[in-house]
Image (cartoon, helix red, strand yellow):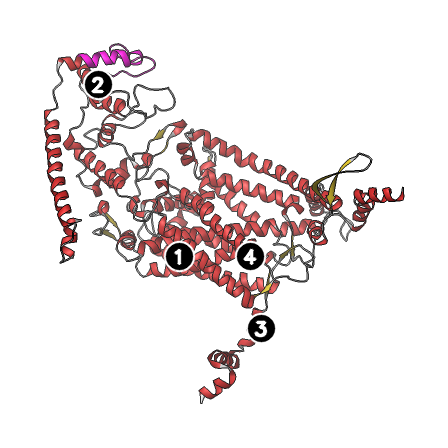
Amino acid sequence: MSNAVQAKKGGFLAGTANYLDERVGVAGILKEFGRKIFPDHWSFMLGEVALYSFLVLLLSGTFLTFFFQPAMTPVIYDGAYGPLKGAEMSIAYASTLDISFEVRGGLLMRQVHHWSALLFVAAAGLHMLRVFFTGAFRKPREINWLVGFVLFVLGMAGGFTGYSLPDDLLSGNGLRIIDGMIKGIPVIGAYTSSLLFGGEFPGETIVARLYGLHILLVPALILVFIVIHLFMVVIHKHTHYSGAGKRDDNVVGYPLMPVYVAKAGGFFFIVFGVIMLIAATITINPVWNYGGYDPSPVSAGTQPDWYIGFLDGALRLAPTHLEVTAGGVTWAWNILLPMIVGVGFLAVVALYPFIEAWVTGDKREHHVLDRPRNAPTRTAIGAAGVTFYAALWAGAATDLIATNFKMSLNQVLTSMQILLIVGPIIAFFITKRLCLSLQRKDREIVLHGRESGRIVRLPHGEYIEVHEPLDAHDMYKLVDFADYKPTLARPNAKGKITVGARVRAGLSRFYFEDRISPVGQIELEAAHHDHASELDAEAHKELTN
Amino acid sequence: MAFMKKSNGSRRSPFAAVLVIAAGLALTGGGYAATTAAVAETAAPAAADAAQLDTGHKLFLANCASCHGKNAEGTNNAPSLIGVGAASVEFQVDSGRMPAQASGPQIQKKYPQFTADQIDAMAAWVATLAPGPAIPTDAQLEANGNATRGGELFRINCAMCHNAVGAGGALTEGKYAPSLVGVPADHIYEAMLTGPQNMPVFNDANLTPADKKDIITYLKYVESNPSAGGYELGNLGPVAEGLFIWIFGLGLIVAITIWLGAKSN
């Protein structure tokens, strides 16, 4: 019977599709999602890279849970790794060693998991930078920026909880720093640390607790936020770069089905392949080198994974001797200050879209992306932020910079401290001036065309270089951007100019005082009228003479 | 190889005769080399004779006295060598640190400036000035101790400066703990014994000769057994890994995205 029905409807695939459609309305879903348009640009794939790294994390992580035992009960190691045979260590560390040396494919999976974790956060970070510098966080995407930010922080949390699981010397040193930071918080610090570690550090429970967070809570939250993130992308539709025919009320690109499904599917395997290639050839976190955790030794060159590096750097760059005793409590400002700097930096990142929206007062929806140069102050703020982060980040590697480049550790530290303060300011001004110069160049090209390099001698002996006018498509990209102007502080309904309004006006001036307006129609026509192809004019003159 | 082939195949390979001859030659040749080497070792003079002391003294006057003083009593530029022992001399001179090339935060390693005989002569002469740590015997240096114990001792006593696998680390004001990769066993032993430059002394009461042997065993194991996980990125830990993933990992992927993006245009 079924054969006859299927034959009529066009085979097994169509039959299945029909079956599903009649029960869960798959056609409607496909119509809705399958026709979603995605524009084509390499920078739109960075978030995808993070997503795929996360999938690889889930796959390799599941494999690791089959063999990892999150217990801190001491055992005597009797496995395959010679220089640890007979050593006392926790079950967690012993099972990590077993995964590395005795489980078939275990070491590869560990390295896949660790490398993809590094790639996950790195790709998410690069994706955030893309979103920031192109202004993709503007209305209506502010909330999705927040969701993405939460994902970045969750990525850091997932990474750190995972880093601490093997219970080796390196991860134990990392946990010790976290313990120190928690204890540095006045009043609640010691209690919090005691609760977290189940007594005095290191205790016997922390690995099991972090394991619960690492394999259950954090990945579940990441998944939920990824769903929200992608759902919002569907709701908002994708942004696109400016170009002829690309407006704030359309999306120009290819549909999800079948083009992007095929492309994205293929890209997943490419990312997977790159991770496998790296994991199969490059060692990551050779835990067997570090030995089991013992609170007394600390190894030189102890660093966290890169995404926690900026916090470690903040700790290293903080001035020493900042402890103050007040009210019977020691305020360890050399611990608190870096924490405040780290959290404050993240808070500014999270809230930036709202700050900029408030300053511009722009309530329009933006679906066409900015070229970074067309928002000079934002781009400059971004560059300053990147420099600040990079200085903190490099701060975590002061010892390695000192030894590998044969410099004094103290001088490297001092240089980093100076760079942390001065670097962002310099980066801000250089970037802003660069953006303005690039905008001027764009203006010049729009008004006078491109220098063709073709020198023509006119009949009366004058040499001119022929400027080729741009075609409309190229020109569109150079003139299509918002032209904000500084706003004045306006009185409110009661006729008063509030402090908020003054601050806003001040910030608006800071943002838009130096600006290059896009070339307008009148200006363009005037330019063309004035020297529209001097060659033509000359030719015309010749003819009329 | 030869035996593998023979046991695997029932048919006699045409190369079997050649391989048997080669194996025979290798066995006799190797055996000869080993016995002569053993003879050479036992023939080396152990006791410091007067001629050697005289050579050592002359070498000292010509190469060391300008900084360390004519009687090794030390000057403003360099410490006294009275009581530093032969171990200290061998470590400093054989590793090329002495004679120092230039003053700085730390004296650098370089190609050794003297032959083994000359170094022995200087060490013997310095050892006559006052009792001090002697050059360790070959038995003390053999890497056949307990690597597990050595690893533990190394992590507790050495890793905070030299890193858990001896990759080295930074100290204050341009000083540093050098990498221990490729450092010969006698230098490791002598460094522990004499505490050169910024290194503390780990005397025999602190780390017994057996402990030192274990540490050498551990370091030699790590040195001769490369990571099971592939290329080690200099054993520099998470910083090198982070740089790698940003520059090469993400760099490669961004290159691929650009390629994918360019295809459709």
Above/below status of A425 relative to A115: above
Please name which of the two marks, 4 or 2, marks the residue nearer to the observer: 4
- Structural distance between the alpha carbons of marks 4 and 2: 69 Å
Instruction: From the top left corner, tell me how far across and down residue A468 is, in percent.
Output: 73, 46
Q: Is residue A541 left or right of residue B212?
A: right
Residue A488 visible, this angle: no
Please name which of the two marks, 1 or 4, marks the residue nearer to the observer: 4
Q: Which of A11 and A395 is in front in this view?
A: A11
Residue where numbered disc 2 is placed:
B118
Above/below status of B207 relative to A258: above
Residue range in magenta is: B54-82
Secondary element type, mark 3? helix
Instruction: From the top left corner, tell me how far across and down residue A426 is, in percent.
Output: 59, 35
Give the quarter of the image for residue B146: top left
Kind of residue at badge 4: Lys
Residue where numbered disc 4 is placed:
B263
User: Which quadrant holds the N terminus of chain A?
Assistant: bottom left
Above/below status of B23 relative to A28: above
- Structural distance between the alpha carbons of marks 1 and 4: 39 Å
Kind of residue at badge 3: Lys
